[in-house]
Structure formats: C-alpha cells, structure tokens
C-alpha cells in the first residue's frame, strides 16, 4: 500500500528505528554523523559509493521527507515518467510498508523547519541534485529534503 499517512501530510519529518529514536531522545539531537556506539541501525546508505553515503549525507546533512503540499498522485505520475527515481526508496520508509510490518516499527519525527536555518526543501534540493556532478549517490527526488546541521529535538 503506497499511501502517505495523513498525519505526515503537510509536514517535514525524519524517520528512524525505535532504538535510534530512544538514542535521539537521550542526546536531544538527530546528528548528521552519530557516534557509532549510539547508532542502533544501519544508516540508509549507498553501496555504490565508496563511503556508503547518500546525496544528502555527502552534503553533510540529515535526510528528511518534505510532505508540505505533497501529492502522492503527482509523485506517482513523476515516477512513471522518469528514470531518475526509484519508487521503492520512498515507499520502503512508510509505516504501512510490509518491510516495517515485518521488522517492527518506523518512527517518524515531525521537524519544525522554521527552527532550522540550514533547511533545503525538496524542490530546491532536487534542482541542486540535477545540476550536481555526483549522480551516483542515492537520492529520492521530489520528496527528499535536507537539513545541513544537527537537529535539536527540543
């Protein structure tokens, strides 16, 4: 089922595991580069990159999903007409995806981007990614956004 839960629509959010969520609560931050000792899951990475980084990680940021004014219908039309995106990349993170039903829960944290001076929304990041010379890094076009600093959860 490829639906965005209504609670996430019109928000910007970060997703993680329950174990990592507890570490985030302890530290008070979503870190760009968390200490491996507090990282409770394998970071979403890119096996094709020698540093196992995604596009946003390569920028020195935290990946977030920008669902502000998001249309799943428009996104699916985009997916059907482009070579740029891999639809399973977005859908595998959704709470109702069978991967999360089998492995446990995914935790979604809504981020107040008005408190983040280094926030790059999905459309700006998409344009930046299109012109970048590093196309081999994993990126979820038209939905992934970035915050180029640690994120306080306070």
Image: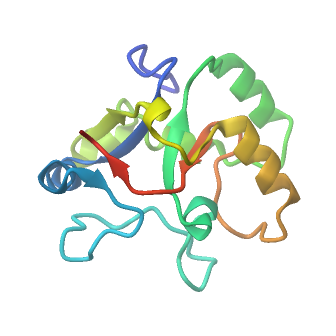
Q: State the image coordinates of residue 16 (x, y, percent, origin top left).
A: 32, 48
**Residue closest to the far bottom:** 50
Question: Tag count in the figure?
Answer: 0
Give the residue displayed 27% in from the left and 74% down from the top.
35
Tell me where residue 50 sits by quadrant. Answer: bottom right
Decide: is 96 above or below 104: above
**Residue closest to the far top:** 6
Q: Is residue 37 left or right of residue 75?
A: left
State the colouring used for the structure image: rainbow
Q: State the image coordinates of residue 80 (x, y, percent, origin top left).
A: 80, 33
Can residue 10 be seen?
yes
Decide: is 64 above or below 7: below
Of residue 64 and residue 77, the one placed in the foreground of this image is 64
Q: Which quarter of the figure is the C terminus placed in? A: top left
Give the residue displayed 27% in from the left and 53% down from the top.
29
Tell me where residue 77 sits by quadrant. Answer: top right
Q: Is residue 56 left or right of residue 79?
A: left
Q: Is residue 69 left or right of residue 127?
A: left
Q: State the image coordinates of residue 140 (x, y, percent, origin top left).
A: 64, 48
Of residue 120 and residue 42, the one placed in the foreground of this image is 120
Q: State the image coordinates of residue 60 (x, y, percent, origin top left).
A: 54, 66
Can residue 99 be seen?
no
Give the residue displayed 79% in from the left and 31% down from the top.
78
């Amino acid at each position: 089922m490829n639906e965005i839960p209504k609670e996430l629509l019109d928000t910007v959010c970060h997703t993680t595991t329950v174990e990592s969520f507890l570490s985030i609560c302890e530290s008070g931050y979503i870190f760009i580069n968390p200490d491996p000792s507090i990282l409770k899951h394998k970071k979403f990475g890119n096996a094709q990159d020698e540093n196992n980084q995604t596009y946003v990680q390569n920028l020195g940021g935290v990946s977030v999903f920008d669902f502000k004014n998001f249309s799943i219908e428009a996104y699916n039309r985009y997916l059907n007409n482009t070579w740029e995106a891999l639809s399973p990349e977005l859908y595998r993170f959704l709470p109702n995806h069978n991967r999360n039903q089998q492995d446990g829960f995914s935790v979604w944290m809504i981020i107040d981007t008005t408190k983040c001076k280094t926030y790059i929304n999905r459309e700006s990041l998409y344009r930046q990614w299109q012109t970048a010379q590093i196309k081999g890094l994993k990126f979820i076009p038209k939905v992934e956004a970035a915050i180029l600093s640690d994120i306080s959860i306070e």
